[in-house]
Image (cartoon, rainbow, N blue to C red):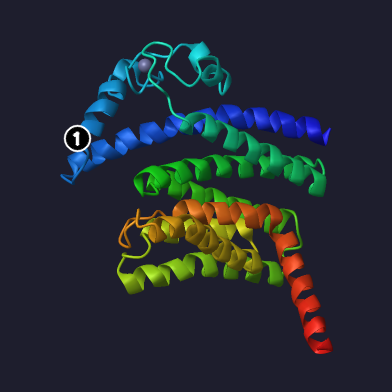
Amino acid sequence: MTVLLSFIAGVMGLLLGSFAGAQVWRLRARQLAHDKAAGEEYDTSEYKRLHGLMGQKTSEDRSRCLSCGHTLAWYDLIPLVSWVSTRGKCRYCKQPIGLLEPLIELGTASVFGLFTYMWIASSGLQAFGLILLLLWLAAFVMLIILFVYDLKWFLLPDVIMFPLIGLSLVISLMSITLFSNATLGEIASTTTSVAILGGLYLILWLVSKGAWVGFGDVKLGVALGLLLMDWKLALLTLFLANLIGTLVVLPGLLSGKLSRKAQVPFGPFLILGFFISLTAGHWILDGYMAFTQWLSTVLLML
Ligand SMILES: [Zn+2]
């Protein structure tokens, strides 16, 4: 039963991943229009391309090929299957679609399947629990959109960020009041978790006047803190985000491909760190505790 439901969640993840991928491009077109209207610098060729493809009101909600603008038929929009059947190329203009779309679909499917499996394995199948699970899955879709958007354009759009903070608050409040005894300790741990993830970035943002981290990272920190509801996991998320960030950036810095001043989006590292903490955090912390205990006994024997 658990496996079947996780599989269904995985298929749902494929469909919502496909939706998330399309949403990223719609948001981008909207952002460019906003930048243009506000008189800010914007990429004119990208604007023309995206608006040429998406601007027509009549077909705004139909997906189009980003290269040739051909309206896509239903059989072009089946997650993964369409991509594999045309070997990653547009059926009409034969331009490569890129790996991003299928990766978003696979990523969402894996997150949905894994999280659902862990959820049901740990809390069973209660009606309230399933509602909460669906809210979590919605939060993951928003996080995936933010992940891709920040990775590509170094920005965490508010159109997604504010609903995510609202949803995280609902998840947090529901978890504390409906599923546990709402002890002072839990409330304090959640508050501290938000203070650690949001507060640290707020300080960094204030001190550097926005040079080291963007205000989007502060807002993301608040949302992730609310979702984690645990100050230890919040600390672990920070640690993992920095570790992953260093591992990704260091080879580029050492080989000279990346200049010291290169812009690096921090959102994706934070979201990755969050997901690892959320799913494996307790094991990592237990392992770490066991390791320090073992280390101290070894040191005492010497
Ligand atoms: Zn095409």
- Taking the spot 62% from the left edge, 58% from the top edge, the residue there is 228
Instruction: Report which residue position mark 1 lands on.
Output: 44
Q: Position of residue 273 (x, y in %)?
A: 57, 56
- Taking the spot 55% from the left edge, 19% from the top edge, the residue there is 84
Residue in front for this viewpoint, 178 or 144: 144
- Taking the spot 41% from the left edge, 68% from the top edge, the residue there is 202
> What count of labels does the image hold?
1
**Residue, far left:** 39
The answer to whether any part of residue 201 appears in the image is yes
Image quadrant in which you'd find residue 189 = bottom right
Q: Position of residue 72 (x, y in %)?
A: 42, 14
Residue in front for this viewpoint, 168 or 53: 53
Residue in front for this viewpoint, 262 or 236: 262
Image quadrant in which you'd find residue 97 = top left
The answer to whether any part of residue 221 appears in the image is no
Q: Which quarter shows the C terminus?
A: bottom right
Q: Would you place residue 42 above or below residue 281 in this image?
A: above
Please state which amino acid type lies under the numbered disc 1: Thr
Q: Would you place residue 128 above or below residue 254 in this image?
A: above
Q: Would you place residue 183 above or below residue 12 in this image?
A: below
- Taking the spot 19% from the left edge, 39% from the top edge, the residue there is 36
User: Would the CB of label 1 be found within 8 Å of ligand 1?
Assistant: no
Q: Position of residue 200 (x, y in %)?
A: 47, 70
Q: Position of residue 105 (x, y in %)?
A: 56, 31
Quadrant of ligand 1 in image: top left
Q: Residues within 10 Å of mark 1 (few under 14, many from 20)?
A: few
Q: Which quarter shows the N terminus?
A: top right
Element type at mark 1: helix
Query: Quick check: 114 left or right of 270?
Result: right
Query: Quick check: 282 left or right of 64?
Result: right
